[in-house]
Amino acid sequence: MKKLAFIIGYGGAAFPLAAKAAGEERKTLGLECVASTDATAPQYRQFIASADAIFYSHQLPDDVIEAIKAAKERGAMVISASDAYFDLASARPQLVLEARRYFATDGEDSFRALARLLAKAVGLNVDVPPLREIPRMGIYRPRLGTFTSLEEYLKVYNVWNREGVAGVLFHRTYWLYGNTAHINALVEALEAENLAVVPVFTYGSRDESIGAPSAEDAIREFFFYRGERVVDAVVNLLFLLDRGRWHRRADRFKIAETGVVEESERPNNNADNFILLSRSGPKIRRALTT
C-alpha cells in the first residue's frame, strides 16, 4: 500500500483542511496517508521515513529532516512547497510546480487534488481534478462579503462620507480559512471612529511561479481608484511587505502627512517598488494607536 505524508508548517493554518482531505482520500484511494504540522511531525518519523511521497512546507525539525533524507535515499518522491530545504526535494520540476500551485490555491478541494496528484505520481491510477481558482487577493468586508475589484466594493460601500479612509492589509489565509474575528473587530473599531475601511487580503511577497501577488500588487489594485489614492492610512497585518526572496526592507512603505505617492529612489531589483505616503490626520492617527 502506497504511503503519502504531508507536513504543513508556517503556523499550520492549512492543517485542518489538509488533514480532512488526507483522511478522506486515504479511504477513497486505498492508501496510507498522514498529515501533520511541523510541530507534530516528529511523532510520525517512522511513517515519513517509509513514505513513497512527501510534501512539506516551511520549517522542519531536525529529526524530521533526517526522516525525509532516509525516505529520499529509498527513492521516495519529495516535494517542497517553498524554497525552504529545497535541497531535500527529489521530484521532477513540473510536478513540483503543479503541487505548489495546488497548495498555494488552498481550500479543501485543492488539498484533495494535491493528494490525488501525489497518488498518481507514485503509480496509482487516479484522476486529478483541474486547479480551481480562488481569489489570490481581494477585499473582505464583514457582512458584505468578498470583492475582487475596488470598483465593485465602492458600489455597495460608501467611503466618501467619512472622516477618512483606512486600508487594512492582512494575510489571505485568514480569509481563506474563516479566521477573521480579529479583522472583523478591527473594522468595527475603525468605523466607530467614523472611518471608512478597505480590508484587503493578499500574500506578503510575490511568487510568480504559482501566481501569488505581493502586497504591492494589492496596494496598487485596491488602495487606488482611477489613478487617485483612496486611503489615508494603512494598517499592516502582514509579516512581509516585499516580493524579494530574502530581502526585507523596513522602509518600503512609509506613512507621512503629505498626500502624494512617490517612486522609491533607492535601487532595487523590484521595478514595482514604491513608497506609500499618506495624509493621515489626527482622527486616523488616534484610531490606529488606541
Image (tube, rainbow, N blue to C red):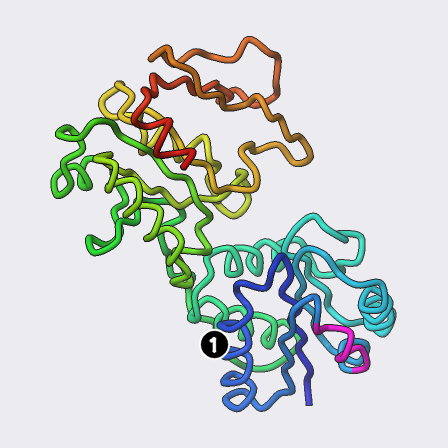
Residue 17 as seen in the image, left or right of residue 150: right
User: Which stretch appears magenta?
Assistant: 40-46
Residue 253 as seen in the image, left or right of residue 5: left
- In this rendering, the answer to whether 131 lies above or below 140 is below
- In the rendered image, residue 31, in percent from the top left (x then y), is placed at 62, 87
Type of amino acid at the residue the image marks with label 1: Asp
Residue at the image point whose x is 36% and y is 30% from the top: 286
- In this rendering, the answer to whether 240 lies above or below 131 is above
Q: Which picture quadrant has residue 191?
A: top left
- In the rendered image, residue 209, in percent from the top left (x then y), is placed at 55, 44
Residue 251 as seen in the image, left or right of residue 65: left
Residue at the image point whose x is 53% and y is 68% from the top: 114
Residue 81 in the magenta stretch? The answer is no
Query: Which quarter of the rendering shows the C terminus?
Result: top left
101 vs 192, nearest the viewer: 192
- In the rendered image, residue 214, in percent from the top left (x then y), is placed at 48, 37
Residue at the image point whose x is 75% and y is 61% from the top: 60
Query: Which quarter of the rendering shows the N terminus?
Result: bottom right
Residue tagged by mark 1? 127
Q: Residues within 10 Å of mark 1 (few under 14, many from 20)?
A: few
